[in-house]
C-alpha cells in the first residue's frame, strides 16, 4: 500500500492587490502517494503554479495545511523547509535556471555540493548527464547548448540526488514540439526508473494524460 507523501487540507492563498484581497486558491485539498504521477492543468492565472509552490514549501498558504513527508510546513521556517527538501525534492522549470558561468557538469553538481555526496560528486553528476544523453557535453556552458540540451541538464540536476519528489512546472513550455516530446519521454523514463513522485504543472493535455491522475485548476479550485 502506497504511503501519502504530500497532503493538503483546505488550502487558501490570497494576496493584496489594488487595495483588496485577491484570492488565488480557494480551499484546495489533495493527497498524493509515493511514486505517483499527478498532472495539474489550467488556464494562466488559474492558480496551478501557486499551488505547486505551496506543495513544495516555497511559499506558505494564507490558511489551510500542507503536509510534506509527514511534516506540517506551517510549523517550519524557510530554512527548515529548505532542509526538509534537501536531497529529497527536485525541481524542473520552464526557464532552465542554469548558472551561465558554470559548465553542464558543475550545474548538475550543485545539489550534491549542498548535500553529503562527498568525493563521489563528479561521478554522480557525470552519470546523471550520461543518462540524459549529454555524456559528451560535460564541459559545455549553457550558452553553448540548445534549449533542449539545457533542459536535459536541468533534468539531470533534478534527478542527481535521486529525489523522492520531482516538481515540474511547464518543463516543455520553452521548447518546440519535437524537442518537448523528447524531454517528456526522458522525464517519464527517469520518473519510472527511480519511482519518483511526480507533480507536473503543464498547459499540454497530451503530457498531462501520461500521468496517473490529472486535475484541472479553475478559478483557484481543483476539479
Image (cartoon, grey):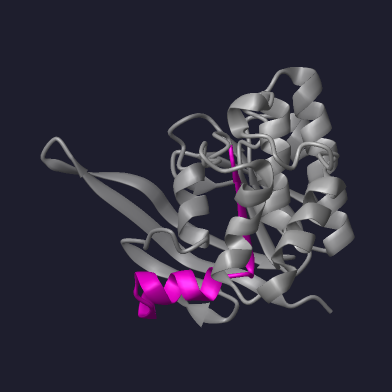
Task: Work out whether 25 lies above or below 142.
Answer: below
Residue at point 63% right, 42% down? 103
Residue 61 at x, y percent in the picture: 36, 61
Comparing 163 with 75, the one in front is: 163
Q: Quick check: 178 left or right of 62?
A: right
Q: Position of residue 140 (x, y in %)?
A: 68, 35
Magenta segment includes 184: no
Looking at the picture, tell me which residue is in the foreground, 11 or 72. 72
Locate residue 198 relative to residue 13 in the image: left or right: right
Q: Which picture quadrant has residue 120? A: bottom right
Residue 92: in magenta span: yes
Which residue lies at the image location 77% right of the left edge and 36% below the top edge? 137
Q: Is residue 96 above or below residue 61?
A: above
> Residue at coordinates 56% horizontally, 41% vertically from top-left?
98
Outermost residue, left direction?
A: 19
Q: Nearer the viewer, residue 37 or 122?
A: 122
Whether residue 162 appears in this view of the structure is yes
Instruction: Report x, y in % for residue 39.
Output: 68, 46
* Region rendered in magenta: 74-93
In the foreground, 145 or 72: 145
Residue at image point 70% right, 68% down: 164
Is residue 117 among what the camera can see? no
Report the side of 130 relative to 107 (left or right). right
Q: Quadrant of the N terminus?
A: bottom right
Q: Is residue 40 left or right of residue 97?
A: right
Amino acid at each position: 500500500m502506497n504511503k501519502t507523501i504530500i497532503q493538503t487540507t483546505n488550502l487558501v492563498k490570497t494576496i493584496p492587490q489594488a487595495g483588496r484581497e485577491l484570492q488565488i486558491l480557494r480551499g484546495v485539498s489533495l493527497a498524493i502517494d509515493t511514486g505517483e504521477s499527478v498532472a495539474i492543468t489550467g488556464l494562466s492565472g488559474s492558480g496551478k503554479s501557486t499551488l505547486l509552490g505551496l506543495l513544495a514549501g516555497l511559499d506558505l498558504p494564507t490558511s489551510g495545511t500542507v503536509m510534506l513527508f509527514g511534516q506540517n510546513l506551517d510549523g517550519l521556517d524557510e530554512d527548515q523547509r529548505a532542509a526538509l527538501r534537501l536531497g529529497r525534492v527536485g525541481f524542473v522549470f520552464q526557464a532552465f535556471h542554469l548558472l551561465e558561468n558554470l559548465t553542464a557538469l558543475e550545474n548538475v553538481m550543485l545539489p550534491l555540493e549542498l548535500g553529503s555526496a562527498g568525493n563521489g560528486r563528479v561521478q554522480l553528476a557525470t552519470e546523471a548527464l550520461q543518462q540524459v544523453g549529454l555524456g559528451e557535453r560535460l564541459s559545455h556552458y549553457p550558452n553553448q547548448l540548445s534549449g533542449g540540451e539545457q533542459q536535459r541538464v536541468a533534468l539531470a540536476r533534478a534527478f542527481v540526488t535521486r529525489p523522492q519528489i520531482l516538481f515540474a512546472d511547464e518543463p516543455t513550455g520553452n521548447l518546440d514540439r519535437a524537442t518537448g516530446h523528447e524531454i517528456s519521454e526522458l522525464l517519464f523514463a527517469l520518473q519510472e526508473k527511480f519511482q519518483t513522485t511526480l507533480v507536473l504543472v503543464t498547459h499540454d493535455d497530451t503530457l498531462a494524460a501520461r500521468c496517473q491522475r490529472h486535475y484541472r485548476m479553475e478559478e483557484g479550485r481543483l476539479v
